[in-house]
Image (cartoon, rainbow, N blue to C red):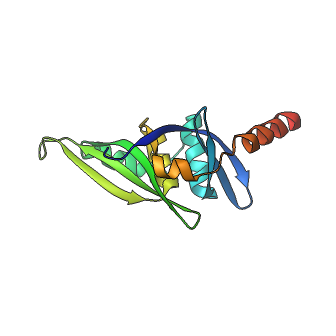
């Protein structure tokens, strides 16, 4: 990793309009990435270790990586342009064809986060993005309180 990065985790996934709000951060700051319902549900299933009858898209991708002797090493949310986040999926392959190969792919942060959670890989945010995003810790706290009151 050449650039400075900040380690983060998915703190919560909450319904939002026709999708989900994925709260990403650490003890210092939390920010939101809005994702479509399908990927938001996949992230939630991976976080909750929900059993599925049939493999979903991210399961298939994970199975394919495993079959090829590869795994997700890390994910980096590396850019933010016009309220759109960008991410990189870093894959390490080690098999009979390659002693060790590192592959870096561009991807939607939602898909990259789903793959990272599925494969227990760390998630990072570039320092530039981290400095730019607004802290939403207070919103997360309020939404969690509202959910707890409704339960």
Q: Is residue 92 above or below residue 48?
A: below
In the rendered structure, the answer to whether residue 26 lies left or right of residue 126 reads: right
Location of residue 119 in the rendering, given as x and y in whole percent from the top left corner:
41, 38
Determine the residue positioned at 67% across, 53% down.
Answer: 20
Q: Residue at coordinates 72% horizontally, 51% vertically from top-left?
A: 15
Answer with left or right where residue 17 lies relative to residue 97. Answer: right
- Which residue appears farthest toward the bottom when viewing the image? 82
The quadrant in which the N terminus is found is top left
Residue 73 in the figure: left or right of residue 9: left
81 and 64: which one is in front?
Answer: 81
Q: Residue furthest right?
A: 149
Q: Position of residue 10 (x, y in %)?
A: 57, 40
Instruction: Identify which residue is drawn at 52% across, 54% down.
Output: 110
Give the tally of numbered discs: 0
Using the rendered image of the protein, determine whether residue 55 is visible from the camera's viewpoint: no
Can you tell which quarter of the image residue 13 is in? top right
Q: Is residue 142 visible?
A: yes
Q: Residue furthest top?
A: 27
**Considering the image in quadrants, where does the C terminus appear?**
top right
Pinpoint residue 17: horizontal percent, then vertical percent: 74, 60
- Which is nearer the eye, 25 or 5? 5
- Residue 74 percent coordinates (x, y): 38, 42
């Amino acid at each position: 990793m050449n650039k400075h990065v900040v380690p983060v985790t998915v703190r919560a996934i909450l319904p939002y309009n026709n999708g989900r709000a994925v709260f990403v951060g650490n003890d210092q700051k939390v920010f939101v990435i809005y994702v479509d319902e399908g990927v938001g549900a996949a992230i939630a299933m991976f976080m909750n270790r929900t059993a599925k009858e049939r493999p979903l898209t991210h399961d298939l991708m994970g199975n394919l990586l495993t079959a090829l002797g590869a795994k997700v090493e890390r994910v980096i949310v590396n850019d933010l342009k016009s309220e759109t986040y960008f991410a990189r999926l870093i894959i390490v392959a080690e098999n009979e064809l390659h002693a060790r190969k590192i592959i870096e792919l561009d991807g939607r942060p939602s898909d990259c986060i789903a793959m990272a959670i599925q494969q227990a890989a760390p998630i990072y945010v570039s320092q530039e993005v981290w400095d730019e995003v607004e802290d939403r810790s207070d919103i997360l706290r309020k939404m969690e309180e509202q959910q707890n009151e409704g339960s």
